[in-house]
Image (spheres, rainbow, N blue to C red):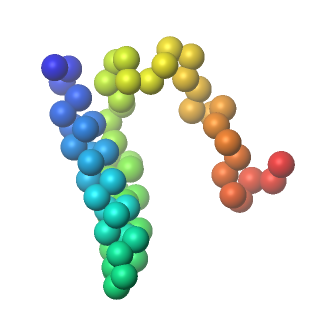
């Protein structure tokens, strides 16, 4: 197993669980916002082979705050 695979998988799992928690009634959305930002920043580079060879992170759909 590659050195960062376990860290990457664990961080992605935590982000997923946090997203599920954020959708629950009564969730502390301030907590979700603070922790999700921290987890996203700590996300290591994806393991080799996880993304296609031509993947370009700048070539995705426009975010809601970008105008077409």
| Residue 26 figure quarter | bottom left
Q: Farthest right residue?
A: 68
| Residue placed most toward the observer, 60 or 4 | 60
Quadrant location of the N terminus in the rendered image: top left
| Residue 21 figure quarter | bottom left
Task: Point out residue 58 in the picture as x, y percentages from the top left corner.
Answer: 63, 34
The residue shown at (38%, 70%) is 22
The residue shown at (18%, 24%) is 3
| Residue 12 figure quarter | top left
- Does residue 5 appear left or right of residue 23 in this picture? left
The residue shown at (50%, 14%) is 53
Task: Point out residue 5 in the picture as x, y percentages from the top left corner.
Answer: 23, 29
- Does residue 40 appear left or right of residue 58 in this picture? left
Residue 19 drawn above or below residue 54: below
Q: Farthest bottom residue?
A: 26
The residue shown at (64%, 37%) is 60
Total numbered circles: 0
Residue 29 drawn above or below residue 48: below
Task: Point out residue 6 in the picture as x, y percentages from the top left corner.
Answer: 18, 33
Task: Point out residue 20 in the picture as x, y percentages from the top left corner.
Answer: 34, 64
């Amino acid at each position: 197993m590659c050195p960062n695979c376990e860290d990457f998988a664990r961080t992605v799992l935590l982000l997923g669980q946090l997203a599920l928690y954020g959708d629950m009634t009564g969730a502390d959305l301030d907590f979700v916002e603070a922790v999700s930002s921290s987890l996203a920043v700590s996300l290591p580079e994806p393991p080799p082979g996880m993304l296609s060879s031509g993947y370009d992170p700048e070539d995705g759909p426009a975010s809601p705050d970008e105008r077409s």
